[in-house]
Image (cartoon, rainbow, N blue to C red):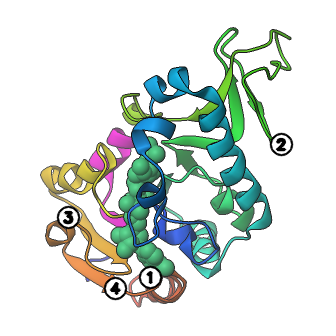
Amino acid sequence: MPQPFRSLVILTGAGISAESGLGTFRDKDGLWTRYSLEDVATPEGFVRDPVLVHDFYNARRRNLIDAAPNAAHAALAELERHWDGDFLLVTQNVDDLHERAGSQKLLHMHGELLKMRCENCGQVTSWTGDAAPDSICPVCRVQGYMRPHVVWFGEMPFYMEMIFTALQRCDLFLSVGTSGTVYPAAGFVSEVRQAGRAHTVELNLDPSDGHSLFAEHLHGPATEVVPRYVTRLLQADTPLV
Ligand code: OAD
């Protein structure tokens, strides 16, 4: 394995939270097998039926509050604590399990379930309860403009400039628990390969759509493969920086 590594970018997806009891999207029984993403994850769906969309996110929010981070979240937080070089964790997940495990250098490119955004004043606020079309913005006090602070299909993910800068500079890229089907995240490994200096590793239950683009693969449940890989990185004979 090429070492030492100085600059690490990790991408995570729904698979890392699966063993915490949060459903993935595309697995058997995944969310998109039970709901139409056009109905609950697009701006048009929200205009058409805001009650349905709020109910969908209310249910996910309640599940999240009852869930806890697992050994894979904990291992990535531990890796961050011991990593002396550049470190960036980019998650497609809207859950807060990385934060609860202790991760700090973290970007939620698809937004956050425990936040709502007011389309009247633009402010983002913490939100742990249910929301409805007549919810009042706690900042501007206007009713009827609150929406989940999540990125829907057709909308631009957050922090893209910072993420692409980190991808171009990194020398180790890990992709954890993602099917590699949704862009732009699905294109991160190609971006890293184009820059030409990074080792790329996929850690996933089974080979993702883009698995052939990775130099190294560890397949299995995230709670097993992620702690094992982190231990290997932290115990590498060669200093990491
Ligand atoms: P997916 O549901 O598409 O993929 C989850 C991946 O996790 C699959 O490749 C599974 O094999 C893997 N997996 C399942 N259980 C696992 C486990 N215990 N350990 C390790 N891997 C496991 O979820 P994402 O790739 O995150 O976007 O989906 C990307 C985006 O599509 C989401 O952020 C969401 C969705 O539509 C928006 O809503 C904008």
- Specify start and end residues of the magenta stretch as a single range: 163-177
Observer able to see residue 8:
no
Cα–Cα span, label 2 and label 3: 37 Å
Question: Residue tagged by mark 1?
Answer: 233
Amino acid type, mark 2: Gly
Residue closest to the eye, 88 or 143: 143
Kindly state the secondary structure of the residue where label 4 is placed. Answer: strand
Q: Residues within 10 Å of mark 2 (few under 14, many from 20)?
A: few
Which residue is label 3 attached to?
Answer: 210
Quadrant hosting ligand 1: bottom left
Q: Secondary structure at mark 2?
A: loop
Percent across and percent down for residue 141 are: 86, 11
Name the residue nearer the viewer: 16 or 27. 27
The alpha-carbon separation of the residues under discs 1 and 4 comes to: 17 Å
Location of residue 157 with respect to 77 vertically, above or below = above
- In the rendered view, would you say 96 is above or below 240? above
Q: Give the labeled residue for mark 2.
A: 129
Residue kind at label 4, given as amino acid type: His
User: Which residue is disc 4 drawn over?
Assistant: 219
The spot of residue 10 in percent (x, y) is 43, 61
